[in-house]
């Protein structure tokens, strides 16, 4: 799953004009009139983190740093996404039936009848997601091979052309129905930057990535628009839309995606691309750097973020199960005991303020193998064992927040959360414990908090803990201080 971040940069400026024309209410113009000392583009840069497909949250009028600088704020759907913390990625498709085949070989392409998951059970997939505590799931509806796993009229390479279920199969529909059944928010992945059937390669050019055929390029762009409209209009509200890598702008021959997104899925969280509300963290190891900030300078930024960035774009850490690839392989390791690795990912993703999107690989029968199912369940149980029920918790405003325990208690975790509706305000902090002898001693410290900071500490007995902010952008708003 190659990320082509450089290809995203040409997409940024067209988005500004799109929002100015179609998605900016009168309040933005009022605020613009109040800021005559800055340019229009500077103003748009400042409110970039607050622009939604359906309108604008007036960040300039809501919050500011101690020196009066506007404080970036998230959209409501971004806060809802960050509260999910855990998601499951589900890679299943034609690549499942031809493991290790390189679609860039452009030869020996799989045929629709190669697709034959005789025991397909999307409920089982969502049971795996629920067992590990995932609150959302993302299904790969169309990957780089180009095979379409729903009843599509975009082009003749999909379930309509397969013998499986008499050409009437719709795995996207089954997945969405299972999400609703299990109370898990649905997401879909459909890449447009690469397509083996069309012989298109990154960043979405025909002729195997070389381009040079305007007629064929236009045909491909229209096919992409058709398939995206089908996915975004048929299955109800989507929580997460996943773009992999870069894509051509419509001005350069790519599909005109933004109007379709605004029309059909204005409330969706979007991973990467010109309408991104979520950013790639910069690796596929399931971990985020620390400190990690929810704000960035540009929409195509990846990595740790920037505390002075003006665009709210939280990070997502995507990763296969240890010992596995992105798609099922009969040789993948079924005997691994990855719990320690999974918990390390959890501490360095969710514990660094990001979401963790852990992959699942259903096999050619259409089922997640039983040994892997057990790993997901064990992961969820271990998170709950360590962090499911705090010894005590509190919240508060200001540079100091104190938590008194019911009685002196042995603890080994400290968890901090900021109230994201008020922005990410803490820049440095220390947490102290009240030790025997009524003495406060430092037990941990850090830099960024954001949605959540989880810190393992050496087990010790304390009667109280207190958070002290030592550097801030504005008065801290602590949503939760808890110990476990």
Image: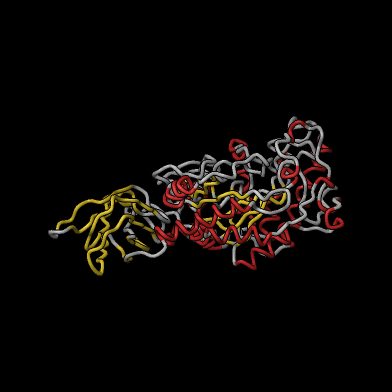
Depth order, front residue of 186/28: 186
Residue at the limit of the structure toward the front, as seen here: 335
Q: Quadrant of residue 23?
A: bottom right
Residue 4 on image: x %, y %: 61, 37
Q: Residue at coordinates 41% horizontally, 55% vertically from top-left?
A: 452
Q: Is residue 30 visible?
A: no
Is 61 on the left-hand or right-hand side of 377?
Answer: left
Q: Position of residue 157 (x, y in %)?
A: 83, 46
Q: How many marks?
A: 0
Q: How is the image coloured?
A: secondary structure
Looking at this view, name the residue that lies furthest to the left. 437
Q: Residue placed at 50% from the left, 46% from the top?
A: 338
Quarter of the rendering occupied by the C terminus = bottom left
Q: Nearer the viewer, residue 259 or 242?
A: 242
Q: Nearer the viewer, residue 265 or 86?
A: 86
Q: Residue at x 34, y 53 (%)?
A: 426
Q: In the rendered view, does 224 fall on the left or right side of 181?
A: right
Is residue 412 visible to us here? yes
- Relative side of 210 to 189, left or right: right
| Residue furthest bottom as drawn | 406
Q: Quadrant of residue 413?
A: bottom left
Q: Look at the image and tell me in which quarter the N terminus lies.
A: top right
Residue located 81% across and 37% down the image: 109
Q: Does 287 sit above or below residue 168?
A: above
Q: Position of residue 203 (x, y in %)?
A: 68, 37
- Give percent across and percent down for residue 89: 61, 51
């Amino acid at each position: 799953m190659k990320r082509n971040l450089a290809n995203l940069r040409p997409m940024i400026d067209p988005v500004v004009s799109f929002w100015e024309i179609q998605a900016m209410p009168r309040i933005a113009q009022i605020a613009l009139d109040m800021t005559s000392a800055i340019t229009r583009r500077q103003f748009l840069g400042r409110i970039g983190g607050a622009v939604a497909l359906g309108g604008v949250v007036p960040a300039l009028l809501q919050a500011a740093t101690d020196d009066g600088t506007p404080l970036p704020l998230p959209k409501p759907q971004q806060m809802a996404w960050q509260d999910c913390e855990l998601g499951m990625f589900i890679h299943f498709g034609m690549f499942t039936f031809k493991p290790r085949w390189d679609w860039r070989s452009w030869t020996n392409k799989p045929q629709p009848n190669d697709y034959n998951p005789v025991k397909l059970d999307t409920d089982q997939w969502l049971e795996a997601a629920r067992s590990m505590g995932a609150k959302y799931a993302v299904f790969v509806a169309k990957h780089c091979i180009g095979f379409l796993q729903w009843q599509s009229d975009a082009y003749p390479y999909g379930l309509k052309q397969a013998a499986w279920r008499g050409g009437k199969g719709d795995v996207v529909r089954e997945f969405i129905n299972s999400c609703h059944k299990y109370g898990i928010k649905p997401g879909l992945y459909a890449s447009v930057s690469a397509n083996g059937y069309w012989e298109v390669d990154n960043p979405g050019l025909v002729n195997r990535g070389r381009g040079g055929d305007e007629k064929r390029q236009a045909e491909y762009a229209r096919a992409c628009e058709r398939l995206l409209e089908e996915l975004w209009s048929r299955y109800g509200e989507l929580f997460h839309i996943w773009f992999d890598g870069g894509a051509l702008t419509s001005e350069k021959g790519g599909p005109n995606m933004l109007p379709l997104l605004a029309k059909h899925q204005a409330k969706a969280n979007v991973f990467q691309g010109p309408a991104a509300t979520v950013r790639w963290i910069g690796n596929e190891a399931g971990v985020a750097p620390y400190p990690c900030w929810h704000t960035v300078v540009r929409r195509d930024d990846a990595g740790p973020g920037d505390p002075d960035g003006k665009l709210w774009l939280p990070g997502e850490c995507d990763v296969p199960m240890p010992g596995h690839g992105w798609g099922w392989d009969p040789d993948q390791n079924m005997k691994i005991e990855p719990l320690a690795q999974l918990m390390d990912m959890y501490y360095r993703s969710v514990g660094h303020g990001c979401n963790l999107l852990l992959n699942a690989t259903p096999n050619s029968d259409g089922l997640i193998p039983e040994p892997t199912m057990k790993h997901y369940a064990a992961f969820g149980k271990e998170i709950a064992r360590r962090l499911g029920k705090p010894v005590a918790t509190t919240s508060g405003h200001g540079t100091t927040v104190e938590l008194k325990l019911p009685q002196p208690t042995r603890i080994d975790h400290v968890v901090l959360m900021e109230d994201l509706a008020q922005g990410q305000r803490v820049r440095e902090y220390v947490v102290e414990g009240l030790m025997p002898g009524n003495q406060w001693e430092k037990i941990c410290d850090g830099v960024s908090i954001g949605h959540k900071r989880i810190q393992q500490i050496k087990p010790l007995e304390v009667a109280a803990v207190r958070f002290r902010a030592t550097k801030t952008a504005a008065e801290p708003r602590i949503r939760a201080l808890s110990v476990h």
